[in-house]
Image (cartoon, grey):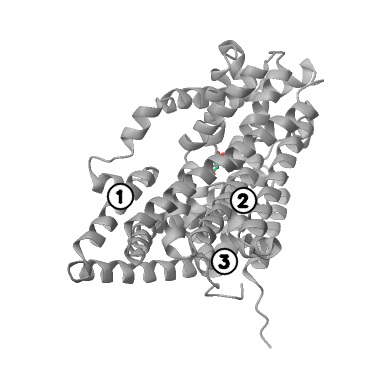
Amino acid sequence: MKIKLALHWQIIIGMVLGGVFGALLANFDWGKPFIENWIYPFGELFINLLKLIAIPLIVASLIKGICDMQDISKLSSIGIRTMALYIFTTTCAIVIGLTIANIVKPGSGISEETIAQLTSDAETTSIVSQRISDSEAQDTNFVEYLVSIVPDNIFSALGDNNQMLQVIFFTMLLGISLLIIGDEKAAPLKRFFDSLNDAVLKMVDLIIKIAPIAVFALLANVVVGTDDVDVLLALLKYSFTVLAGLALMVVVYMLMVSLYAKKNPIWFLKKMSPVQLLAFSTSSSAAALPVNMERVHEHIGVDEEVSSFVLPVGATINMDGTSLYQAVATIFICEALHFDITFGDQLTIVFTALLASIGTAGVPGVGMIMLIIVLQSINFPPEKLPVGIALILSVDRILDMCRTTINITGDAAVATVVAKSVGKLNDPKVSED
Ligand code: ASP
C-alpha cells in the first residue's frame, strides 16, 4: 500500500533533515564550502523557478479576475478594502512590537563586552557598511514612489521582478480596458490569458513537488552558516521579543479569519502551512507568492477576482512581520546603545515603519535595510548606526525567516477577509492537502 504524506509533512521532513545535515557538516572545514557549492544551488534553483512564474501568474490571474468581475466598480471596492486592511494589520503589528519591547526592554542590561563581541569582527563591519549604503539608495520620497508605480515601458517592467506594482498597474489598466471594449472584442485575449492562467497554476503544482528537496538545501545552508551558539544566546531576549510579537500577530490573523470570515482558524493555518514553510525556508515573500496564490485560491476558496489582486499587492507592500521586527529592533538598539527615545519618537516609528513596509521588497534581508531608515527618522546618532546594526546582524537571518512567514500569512488573511466582505469566499476547489 502506498502512503502519501501530506505536503507540509514532506516539507517539514526536508527542513529537519537539511538542518541536521548542515549542523553535522559545520564540524568540518570543508563542510561550509561543500554545502555552498554543491547543496545550496538546489535551493537557489527552486527559488528561481518560483520567481520565474511570478510575473506570468500575476498577469494571467489578474486579467482573468478582472474580466470575471463584469463590473469595474467592484474593483475599487476590493482595492479600498485591501488598502484599509493592510494599513490596519501593519499598524497593529507595529503597535504590538512597540508594546512588547517597552514591557520586556530587550536591550537593557546588555553589557559593553557583549556589544564589543557582537560588533567587532571584520566580516560584520563590511556587511553593515554595505547595508547602510543600500539604505541610502532606498530612501526616496513618497511622491516619487507613487509616480514610479506607473511604468514608462511595460516590457522593462515585465522583465524585472522588483517591479511587481508596476506590472499590476499595467495589468489592471489592460483588464479594465478589456471590460470596456466588451465581450466580443475582448474574447481572444481573455481566452489567451485564461489558458495561460491554467498552465501557470499547473506549473506551481509541478514546481512544488521538488519543495522538500529544495528546503533541505536551503536549511542546510542556513544552519552551516550560523554563528556560534554563544553569540545567538546573547541576543536571546531580543529574539524572543520579536518571536513573541510575531506569535501575537498570528492570533490577530486567526481572529480576523474566524470572527469576520467565519472560517476555522486552525483549518486556515493548516491550509497555509506549505506556503508558510516555504516562506520560512526562502525568507522571501516574492518567492512564496506563486504558491500563496495557488493555496489561497484553490485550498482556501478565495475567488481569483480577489486573490489575484490582494496577494501580489500584499507581497510588495504589506510586511506585518517586518514592521513588527523593525519596531522591536529599534527599541532594542536604542536601549543597548543608551539613546533615549520619547513617546513622540515612538509615534514616528509607527509612521516610518508603516511606510518602510510599503517600500520593503519581498526578498531576504531588506527589512534590515529599511530598519536603518526607521532609526534615522528618530535622529539616531549616525556614528552609532554601524554598531547598532552590527549588534543584531547575527540573528537577522533566522528572524527574517520568521517575519517572512508572518508577512505572507498576513496577506492571505487579508485576502480571505476581503473575499468574504465582497461575497467571494467560496468552497475550496481542493479539499485535501
Ligand atoms: N524577507 C522579507 C520578505 O520577503 C523582507 C524582510 O523583512 O527582510 O517578506
Res 5 → quadrant: bottom right
Asked if residue 270 can be seen in this view, the reply is yes
Q: Residue 93 at what x, y percent from top left?
A: 63, 39
- Where residue 258 sits in the image (x, y, percent)? 67, 59
Which residue sits at x=70%, y=37%? 242
Residue 337, position as x, y percentages in the image? 70, 15
Q: Is residue 66 above or below residue 3?
A: above
Q: Residue at x 52, y 24 (%)?
A: 373
The residue positioned farthest toward the left in the image shown: 185
Query: Which mark sits nearer the N-terminus, 3 or 2?
Result: 2
Name which residue type carries label 3.
Ile
Q: Which residue is mark 1?
A: 158
Work out whether residue 325 or residue 417 is closer to the camera in this orientation and state it: 417
Which disc, if any, is residue 280?
Answer: 2
Neighbor class of circle 2 (other Cα within 10 Å; few <14, some 14-19, many 20+) is many
**Label 1 residue SS:** helix
